[in-house]
Image: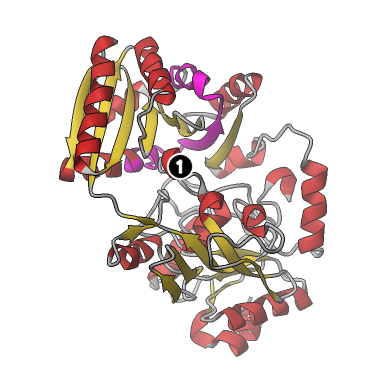
Amino acid sequence: MKVIASDFASIVGEENAVCLWENIELSQQKRIQQAISNEKPQSVHACENLPGCIVYPRTQEQLAAVIATAHGNNWRVLPCGSGSKLSWGGLAKNIDVVVSTERINGLIEHAVGDLTITVEAGMKFSHLQAILADARQFLALDPTTPELATIGGIVATADTGSWRQRYGSVRDQLLGITFVRADGQIAKAGGRVVKNVAGYDLMRLFTGSYGTLGIISQVTFRVYPLQEASGTVVLTGMGEAVSQAADILRGSALTPTQADLLSTKLVSSLGLGKGLGLIARFQSISESVKEQSNRLLAVGEKLGLDGAIYADGDEATLWQRLRECMHSFPTKSVITCKMGVLPTAAVEVLTQVELGMIHIGSGLGILQLDSQSQVLEVRDRIQANSGFLTILEAPVTVKQQVDVWGYTANALPLMRRIKQQFDSKNILSPGRFVGGI
């Protein structure tokens, strides 16, 4: 491993090419080390073996040189940002080096009037939002760990949350990317303006590819103006009534920016009441927020549901606690899954699990399950209704015994051909994606 580290040190400097088990007091190295070993509280792994070193390029050109070196030596690379989502997806195989983009984190351009921003992939999401907030703007994504998540990692894992109700997914907000190919060449797709449609739509292809096609180095997003006011309505009660409320909300003229169905245990854990829950956030001018909130509250009253409106600090705290509850690990055996189902079947799914939330518009959501057998049982029920269930985080024994992705459609041969085109030597995140790609 010292030989590998020495080769990369000639590119990035000795302080930026570190043997994995040395100098572990470095906070970012320790975080990545925990993600790829069994030291994390929930005993999750990112790969089956322990890589030789971690490399931290500081520029896009250094990143390209690092990957070119790995390509020339057939060294297998596990790309990451801060390491907050390294434990997602399948177990990467025979990794020689972890390459982190965390130190490639500059602001390239913020076109305030055009509502676009271009940043390097290692920039923290929280830092990006702070830059935008100074211009009364924001990026409409809701990643699982906003303080740690990097922009490149968010795109690579398609990590978004409730904001998709109004603004769509990660790929819907991408305007352009720059990435380093498996052979070390730098390539670009898209542009820096909203109406740019030149070239192939590689932004959508790279979103959620888990670093298997290339390493993202720069990203351009569309952004939005901050709204004047915000308010959140929570309705709780019997499952049938909550389902009816969700149906009414979907078919109404109301325009929530975030809207989710919550499981019984999640409602209870948040101290919101009893039964299933519907949480909806409205953001606009004050009069609109007040009117829409009251109209949804009235819908709940007619259906016999308990309701409450949250605003200001209470509202921010509620959404923060909701995110924390869905991505906390009370026991080492907990399994976190991403799922998708027809929105009309969401309540049925939530009655089968203790902890879960599902977007009312897309039917996508997060579930926490207790065992391997429960994963298979819930997956069978969801797939029977044309849905899917993918394991994000789980003990390594579960990932070794259960197909993490559970993919049953017919696009796998096409995915393999795309992988072959982008990474013929299979050095980028091998084994982490669908079908062992």
* Image position of 398 with respect to 5: above or below: above
Q: Is mark 1 on a helix, strand or loop?
A: helix
Asked whether residue 382 is drawn in magenta, I would say: no
**Image quadrant in which the N terminus is located:** bottom right
Q: Which portion, as a residue range, is magenta?
A: 323-351
Q: Nearer the viewer, residue 238 or 204?
A: 204
Disc 1: which residue = 164
Name the amino acid, label 1.
Arg
Q: Nearer the viewer, residue 225 or 27?
A: 225
Residue 363 left/right relative to 25: right
Residue 196 left/right relative to 327: right
Q: Which residue is drawn at 67% across and 53% down?
A: 205
The answer to whether residue 304 is visible is no
Q: How many marks?
A: 1
* Image position of 386 with respect to 401: above or below: above
In the rendered image, residue 437, in percent from the top left (x then y), is placed at 73, 51
In the rendered image, residue 406, in percent from the top left (x then y), is placed at 67, 34
Q: Nearer the viewer, residue 315 or 137?
A: 137
Q: Which residue is drawn at 59% across and 82% down?
A: 62
In the rendered image, residue 281, in percent from the top left (x then y), is placed at 30, 36
